Structures are given as C-alpha cells and as structure tokens.
Amino acid sequence: WIESSGITYFPTDSSELFDLFNPHFDFEKVENFIFENIDTSEVNRMEKLFYGFKNIRELDLSLFSTEKVCSMYEMFYGCSNLRKLNLNHFDTSLVEDFSAMFGACSRLEKIEISNWDTGNAKQIYWMFSSCEKLKELNIGNFKTPKIECMFEMFQACYSLKKIDMRNFTFDHITLGDRDNDRVFIEMREDAIIDVKSEKERRAILNLSERNRPKEWNEKNVRIGVKNQESEN
C-alpha cells in the first residue's frame, strides 16, 4: 500500500494484502484491526484479504469503498473466531465472485448483507459453508440472473434456522448438477427457506437427499413469506 498525506491507499489488487506486505508477521495472532484514514476506492480485487485470521474477533469495514471490486473470493475465509462484522456501505454491484467469502467463519452468528446488489454475481459456491453458528440469513434482495455455481453454498450451516431467498431464481442453473450440488447439505431438519414461487420451491424439494435434509417438505420451503416467524 501507499501512504500519502496521512492517508493509506490500498493497491488496485489487494488480494492477500497483509500477508504479502509483511510475510514474516503471524497474522493468525491478530485479534482486531482498526482502520482509520484509509482509501480503498481504487481496489478491484479483495481476494483472501483476511484469509485465515483465526483469532480476529471483530472487523469494522464501514470505511471501505468497494464500488470497483469485482472479486471477494475467500475474503474472510477461516476467520473462525470472528463474531462481529460491519459491512455497512459495501457496494457489491460489480462483484462477480463471492465464493467462500464467509466460509469457515464458524463463530459468526449474524451477517447483515440484505441490501447487497448481486446482479453481476457468477460464483457463490461455499459462500456460507461451515458458518456453524449462523442462525438467520436475509438474502431476500439477492438477484441471481448470472449465477453459474452455488456448490455447497450453505453446507454445514448447522444452526441456520431461516434463509430469505425470495429473489433467487434458478433459471440459468440446475440445482443438483455438478456445479450446483449439495447446496443445502448438512442443514437443520427444521430450517425454513422462503422462496419466490412454486418453481423455486419445487427445484429445492425435488433435490435428492445428497443435496438437502431428507425430512424437508412444503413447510420447510415457503412461498413469498415476509417478516414472519418460522413455523413450528
């Protein structure tokens, strides 16, 4: 990165930035980052930016400008002690790759990304895989016209009780094929998925047991439900 007039400017490609900047420092021991006087407005790649920061507990990225970013691949992957994450003001309108972004964030209970623009997203595989403590996920505003791969997107989300997917469509993919296999595997038997229409409901319920809990039925996959508590 470059420092000028008291401002730290992140490079265009900030992938693995901290490891590359100081490869001899053990970032796994870092518990907190405080970002002040930074400029990320020219960054177009944030791949693995915080990858494997196993002891970090809190991240406030509200000062990050992400309007030019096209890849957030594995951005927080393996942050297994992360409990609080502030992604307010993230502009994701150009992001094509969200794959494994929150993968193995096993202590994270909440992710506020309901206002994200995913119109250009192509890769969302493993996006929340092994988020073992995540309880509820509102991605109801996610639009998926360009999605190519959702492989194991929610795999091993053992605590996830509800997912709002009311804007998801599967028109350009086939759930259960090689690139879109095991999307809901190892989820709760009583989980609730809110979807857009009967078409999306059938796409999920027609999946084999290798793709979803075998107990799921029409009570688990609901149509057009908004701001309603999960059914007993």
Image: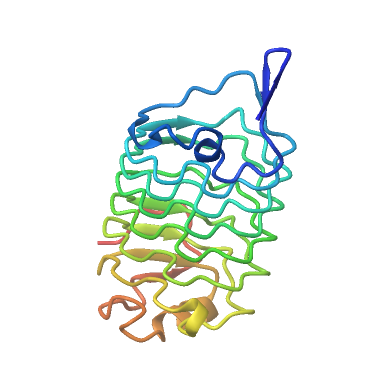
Quadrant assignment, res 67: top right
Quadrant assignment, res 176: bottom left
Look at 58% across and 63% down and name the residue there.
167
Q: 110 or 197: which is nearer to us?
A: 110
Q: Residue 136: where, in percent of width, then height?
A: 37, 51
Tell me the colour scheme of the image. Answer: rainbow
Answer above or below: position of 47 versus 122: above
Answer above or below: position of 87 versus 138: above
Q: Residue 94: where, in percent of width, then height?
A: 71, 52
Answer above or below: position of 230 versus 145: above
Look at 43% across and 50% down and name the residue there.
77
- Visible in this render: residue 45? yes
The C terminus lies in which quarter of the figure?
bottom left
Q: Residue 87: where, in percent of width, then height?
A: 54, 37
Q: 27 left or right of 48?
A: left
Q: Residue 142: where, in percent of width, then height?
A: 59, 58
Look at 70% across and 51% down and name the residue there.
93
Q: 43 or 58: which is nearer to us?
A: 43
